[in-house]
Amino acid sequence: MSNVVYTDTQQRRILGVTRDLVRARELLFDLAWKDLRVRYRYALMGFLWAVLEPVVMMLILTFVFSMVFAGKTAALTGGSDRPFAVFLLCGLIPWQFLAAALTAGTQSLVNHRNLVNKVYFPREVVPLAAVATCLVNLLIGLAVLLGVHVAFGGTIGLGIIWFPVAFAIQLVLVAGLVLLLSCLNVAFRDIGYMVSVGIVFGFYATPIFYPLSLVMQQAERHPWVVNLYLLNPMAELIPAYRQILFENRFPDLALLAWPCVAAAVCLAVGVAVFRRRSPLLSDYL
């Protein structure tokens, strides 16, 4: 019986990435499950931390805008009578998935250097497993969101059928960014620090605790600032999530157009750069 060896030539084949990932699906699952167990093994509350993170952030921001800036929440929610907490969670949970996946994915190859140096396999498995691990927290966060939404008297409308579309766009975007950043971080460790700073900046440059309409009001006075702001695909994807989950309606397709294009470009660039640099990863690790 012959052994199949994953060679440097195979690592460079861009068109073979899907086939290689399908063949390595068990390894991807095992890595994701291992990372998940390690993350919560010695935590007394285990998976409850995945619930507490968005809830605590929601409570802090709700307190700030409901108590410190009393009377401002109605303007932030567009005059809606729905609770500000639900408005916040619709932005926080998708953003926290992005932030956690980028942070873990960027460092994944460095953290698994022993595996990368000793075993031949599609290297994309490592950063994508980090993204898969963060999916568990996202699912828990969505359960919290729906629970809070229903607890405050909200209903789940037909708009929910668009949620998989919005999430698929975000998942492709995250996967492309993680592939690109993880391989660059191997050669340039500054990338990890840049990602940390970028996530903090992105939190405020994304309509998470304020609506996109407030930004668009500045379009006439500062058009270049608004155009620069909208280059962030999450700036339109978060409002689309809100229309689906908070407003119970179909999202405006214009909000999904640029995120869809950005996600496709990021994935294409991420796969191309990763495959080109994949045979060199062991040299830097």
Image: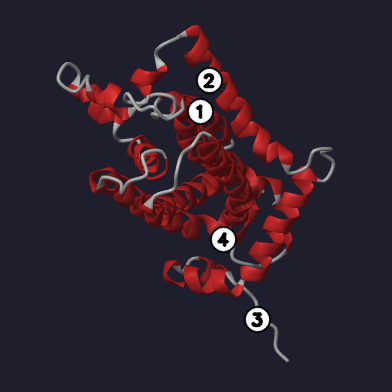
Q: Quadrant of the N terminus?
A: bottom right
SS type, badge 3: loop
Under mark 3, the amino acid is Val
Nearer the camera: disc 4 or disc 2: 2
Q: Mark 1 or mark 4: which comes first in sequence? A: 1
Q: Mark 1 or mark 3: which comes first in sequence? A: 3
SS type, badge 1: helix
Nearer the camera: disc 1 or disc 3: 1
Under mark 1, the amino acid is Ala
Give residue 184's position: percent from left, percent from top. Answer: 52, 44
Residue located beneath label 1 in the image = 85
Q: CA distance from mark 2 to mark 1?
A: 8 Å
Residue located beneath label 2 in the image = 61
Query: Residue 26 vs residue 170: left or right?
Result: right
Q: CA distance from mark 1 to mark 3?
A: 53 Å
Badge 4 crowding class, 10 Å Cα cut-off, few under 14, some 14 to 19, many 20 or more, is some
Above or below, 39 relative to 23: above
